[in-house]
Structures are given as C-alpha cells and as structure tokens.
Amino acid sequence: MSPLDRIANVSILKQHEVDKLYKVENKPALSANEQLCFLVRPRIKNMRYIANLVNADKLAGRIRKYKVILSPQKFYACEMVLEEEGVYGDVSCDEWAFSLLPLDVDLLSMELPEFFRDYFLEGDQRWINTVAQALHLLSTLYGPFPNCYGIGRCAKMSYDLWRKLEEEEDSETKGRKPEIGHIFLLDRDVDFVTALCSQVVYEGLVDDTFRIKCGSVDFGPEVTSSDKSLKVLLNAEDKVFSEIRNEHFSNVFGFLSQKARNLQAQYDRRRGMDIKQMKNFVSQELKGLKQEHRLLSLHIGACESIMKKKTKQDFQELIKTEHALLEGFNIRESTSYIEEHIDRQVSPIESLRLMCLLSITENGLIPKDYRSLKTQYLQSYGPEHLLTFSNLRRAGLLTEQAPGDTLTAVESKVSKLVTDKAAGKITDAFSSLAKRSNFRAISKKLNLIPRVDGEYDLKVPRDMAYVFSGAYVPLSCRIIEQVLDRRSWQGLDEVVRLLNCSEFAFTDTAKEDKASSESLRLILVVFLGGCTFSEISALRFLGREKGYRFIFLTTAVTNSARLMEAMSEVKS
C-alpha cells in the first residue's frame, strides 16, 4: 500500500472510479461490487486467496468480473495456481512492471523488502530479472554506463542478465552519450556488519525509532504535541530535515536551537515595519516562515522522543558494546552484556541482532557460547524462535565454529582427493557451506577501525566513520571508495578472497571517450538486499570530500530490525 500511496493516493483512485479499497487480509468478499481488481505481489498464497474468493462467489451464484494485476512481474507459477484451482478462465491477469520509485533526489527504491529473505535465505532467484529490467530501464533513460563494478553472487547474476537484455535491444543505447559514469552493484551479504549496527545519524535514528516507510514517517502524539498522529514526507524538500539528515545525532539539537533563534529573529523583524513593508512581508515571507516553524517543531519533537527512548534503553552502554565487538576487545564482557540483554527480555529482535554481530565479528561463536546463548534466548523468549536460529545459521548470520573444520583443513583434504579442475568447484561448494565472515582480517586490510589520537570530532567529520561515532567505517562504503580509486578490483584480491567472492567480483570498463568529465563524477550504487541510511549518509559524505555525486538504487531501505524480522519465523 505504501508505494501505491506515493504514486496514486486514495483521492486519485476515487477519481478513477475505485469504489472501495481493501487490504488483502481484510476479506473483500463482502463487497457488493460487480468488479474486483487485485493488485498483488506474485505469490502463490495470494493466488490461492483469490481463487478461494472466486470459487466462493461461484458457489453463491454471484457473477462478477475479476482482474489480477501482478507487480513487479507476472510469474508462470501464479497462473498455474489459478488453473489448478479451476478459475483461470474467470480471471484476467495483467502485469504492472513497477520497478523504480524515486524516494528522494538521490534515492531510488524498488520497494521489494522481500528480496532479502527470498534471495539470501531461500536462495530464490525470482527477483533477479526485476533488477536486470530496472537497470535496463535506467540505461535506456541515461545512456550506457561506461564503468561497471560488482561484488557478490547476486550482483554477478543481475549483471549478466542485464547485459543479455542490452544485447537483445542494442540499438536503443547505441551512440548515446553516457550520463552516469560508474555503476556499482553490491550484495547485502558482502557486508552484514554495517546493517547490524545501531544507527546514529539523524535519518537512521528516525528510521530505527519510528520506521520510515516508503520515504514518509508517522509521527505519533508524543512528537506532534497534539492528540493526533501526522504523516510526514522526509526528503530534500523538507528544508529543516535536509540540513540535519546526515548529521551525527549529537549535533542535531544544537543545529535546531540555532535554527529556532534565526527564525525568531526573522519574525521579530516585522516590529519596526511600515504598512508597505508589512504587506510585502505577509505576502512573500510569512508563509515560508510558518512552514519552517512547523517543520522545526516536528523535528525537535522527534529528537526529544528519540532521546527519551534511547535513555530508557541505556543507549550509551549498547553503543559501547557494539564498538567493543567491532574492535574485537573485551569479548567476554560483551557476551555477558548480551546475556543480560536476553535475561532482562529487553527485545527479542535486539538480542538476536547483538548475537549476530558477535558471531560475524568473531568469525562464528565457540560451540560453548553458541549453545549457552541459544538456550538462554529460547528460555527467555520462547521455543517458537528455534526455526529462526536455523535461518540465521543458513544465511551465515549466526554460526558456530566447528573444531578442526576450518575451511583450509577441509580444502586440503579435498585437494588431496581431487587434483583436476573439479577441485576448484568442490572448494567453491565448501566455501559456500562454511560461510566464514573473516571480518577481523578484512577490517585490518581496509583499515575500517580508525586509529584516533584524542577525541573524534563529530562536528567536523574527517572520514566516513562519523556515521558510527568515529568507531567504524562501513565496509560496503570503504569497498566502493577503494574500487573507485583504483577503477577496478586490482590490488584488492586479498579482500575479495576474504569476502568469499573471488568468482563474483567483476569490472567492465568500456571506452570512456564519450563520457564527459561531469558524467564520470556521477556514480550509481545498487544495493541488492537493502541499504541503510547510515550507508547513504557515509557515501554522501565521501561524495562531498572527493567531488563525486552518488545516486542510490536499492531493493528496499533496510535497518538491523528489518533484517532480523526477515530472518525470523515468529511474526511480531
């Protein structure tokens, strides 16, 4: 419903003779209308639901027209279900190839939150075609991309399929001047750590606290200081928000109070005005000032609300534990903190997130710790979470170290058995089985934990680490920075090997003679499996420092809670 609301809200739909809107869970069978139109994701359960409805109408002798619109694409399996249920002839099926929704001046979303679970847990490749179609659409609009880089299995598959589409319709982009100089495709599982960390830039905190849905947020009475909730669009058009969105939270209050003083000064100017000046003031400035005043009070309310919630959670202590995990210090203390978190039943999702962060940064948990944490978790939050642990293990988010089963030991045993080319394939199969995160080694190689003498100045950030209070540079953003500096993966072989992506890192550099210097500064970054507001802020900062301009395309905007919920079998 949220993406649809951005394109055609209820009043527009009503103008086009839509009588009533229902969400699929709220049974629309009661409608007396002659025509029912279903706008659904291509999922088997949705098809079954529609088929049951049509069959119920048949039994009751009710005659209607049914239209099913599948978005973003139509799958053969869906039509098969309608056929099996005996309603294929009663229903007309259509496809709405909706793949790109501009949420902001530099952010495009495919609004496919299910992509993450479908691909990274279920291994379901259904959405890769949708990604390829979206990239193809962008290249027909903005000309070919002279430089392509990618890392991850999904990135490689999307890239290959996209190239096939380009070859089939080669004439469209031939001879066009490229407007975007570089495109970067990145799988979410290349960097889980960044997505699991607590966000401390303003936009990220608003997302973690209130959930930004499709670029807008519902601020409750605690923010609006009235008895009503308010839906607010958060983008560059909100003048107050655009200035604080990428700031570290510690700077936001100072900025907002300064802004309030400036606003007051502008209001006070009217005191000494004559009638003509007053007329000008009212016709030209007053409306803008009132609008800014409204936005300012909303963001101050939001900040206060965030502060209250975070003080209640003892946010400082939590951040300290996260930083210790990232740096690999005081692991025992951090483990005790996580145990206490579980025993106090602070939040099932938060506890899972911390366990995953511990597992990935430590390259898997020692069996004793794994068993102890899992037991405590199930006793505290209930045995129904058992399946969630199986999911996290399969996705490589929460794993257990096996004694004598390190990857190299397994590889050497296999290599003795097989000496020809098949050895490479078998080793690859083993590396996907034993998903090792190697976070420590990668962190050293790419210098992700900045060494700082004295206090890190968050007011004047010196690098991308500011998005995590100066403790950690997001791995995904560092990779993008390094590849852009080198214009390829050359010299990053060791990092690529540690990321288990040796076969899935690619560079495709075409001739740049047609690309203008302006287009070469424009970079499209594609996140497959979701990206966080922290990463967006970090890359915006890098762009300002190095004279690049980043545009983001993501399957959906994500955060640590959404990641954990996607893996969870217990619906909150």
Image (tube, grey):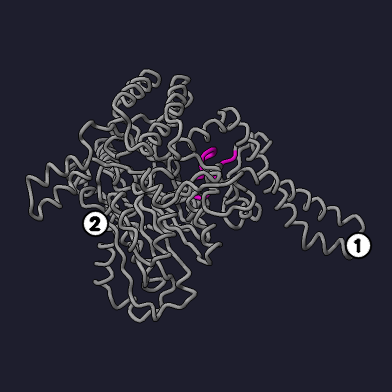
Taking the view exactly as shown, the residue that stands out farthest to the top is 379
Region in magenta? 208-219
Q: Is residue 15 left or right of residue 229?
A: left
Relative depth, front residue between 19 and 492 = 492
Q: Which mark is residue 503?
A: 2
- In the picture of the structure, the residue carrying the numbered disc 1 is 275
Q: Is residue 15 visible?
A: no
Q: Is residue 428 left or right of residue 466?
A: left
Where disc 1 sits, the SS reads: helix
Image vertical order of residue 48 relative to residue 150, above or below: above
Dot 1 amino acid type: Ile
Q: Is residue 368 visible?
A: yes
Query: Residue 389's quadrant in the figure?
Result: top left
Pointer 2 or 1: first along the chain: 1
Coordinates of residue 106 in the picture (x, y in percent): 50, 60
Image vertical order of residue 487 relative to residue 564, above or below: below
Dot 2 amino acid type: Glu
